[in-house]
Amino acid sequence: MYKVGLTGGIGSGKSKVADMLAAWGASIVDTDVIAHDLTAPGGEAIEPIRRAFGPDVIAENGALDRAAMRELVFQSPEARRRLEAILHPMIRSTAQARAELATGHYVVFVVPLLVESGKWLHALDRVCVVDCDSETQVARVQARSGLTREAIGRIMSAQATREERNAVAHDVVFNGRGTSLEELELRVRALHECWCAYAQSNQPLHLPNKMLL
């Protein structure tokens, strides 16, 4: 099946774009959803995380204490690497298993750290970046989560830059300041129709055209 990687910084609107694509018949494999499943009570990653970091990062209900882990990995790059070494292989294998069951026009892997991981590009036919200015990102994340600007800034600093993401993209869809939902839908619909055509014609990985919407 034709494979599209969908990525973007925190607050860029990846989930909204993925919801639109799903409504139009794409199969969605969201690595954030997989990560939450793996770190829910009884999740496959809980015991390896407990062994690596101790009980302080596990909440009373048996799930990962996300706030505690967030603070830990921001303070220690080594802790971040250990966590990623546990989670990332599990996420990739689960994503592949879910993709093998996909029945849509094409499959979309929603991967926030697609650029940063270095493990996804070779497995995809096309990469789409949901692009957004930093101020809009901060405002959206504050509105939905209540995190401080400092906390959001730390998250953004651990992600690839806007320029780094856009450099690897086959397609870039802008969803920043001033973009209405109607405008975003028109842009994403244009991409969807192109990807359906590519999927039907079995186009190769490195396509000559780059859509900037």
Image (spheres, rainbow, N blue to C red):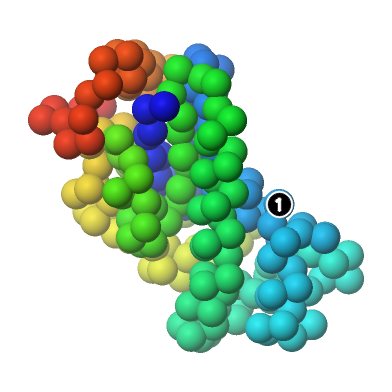
Q: Position of residue 162 (x, y in %)?
A: 28, 53
Q: Which residue is mark 1?
A: 37
Residue at the image position 54 percent from the left and 79 percent from the top: 82
Q: In which quarter of the view is residue 191 placed? A: top left
* Amino acid at the residue labelled 1: Asp
Residue 135, visible in the rendered structure = no
Q: Quadrant of the N terminus?
A: top left
Q: In which quarter of the view is residue 203 placed? A: top left
Q: Is residue 31 above or below residue 58?
A: above
Please, which residue is most extreme toward the right here?
60
- Residue 212 vs residue 29: left or right? left
Residue at the image position 47 percent from the left and 65 percent from the top: 155
Residue at the image position 68 percent from the left and 84 percent from the top: 53
Residue at the image position 17 percent from the left and 36 percent from the top: 206
193 or 156, which lies in front? 193
Q: Quadrant of the C terminus?
A: top left
205 or 116, which lies in front? 205
Q: Position of residue 58 (x, y in %)?
A: 78, 74
- Residue 173 vs residue 52: left or right? left
Q: Position of residue 45 (x, y in %)?
A: 69, 65
Q: Position of residue 39 (x, y in %)?
A: 71, 61
- Residue 209 vs residue 45: left or right? left
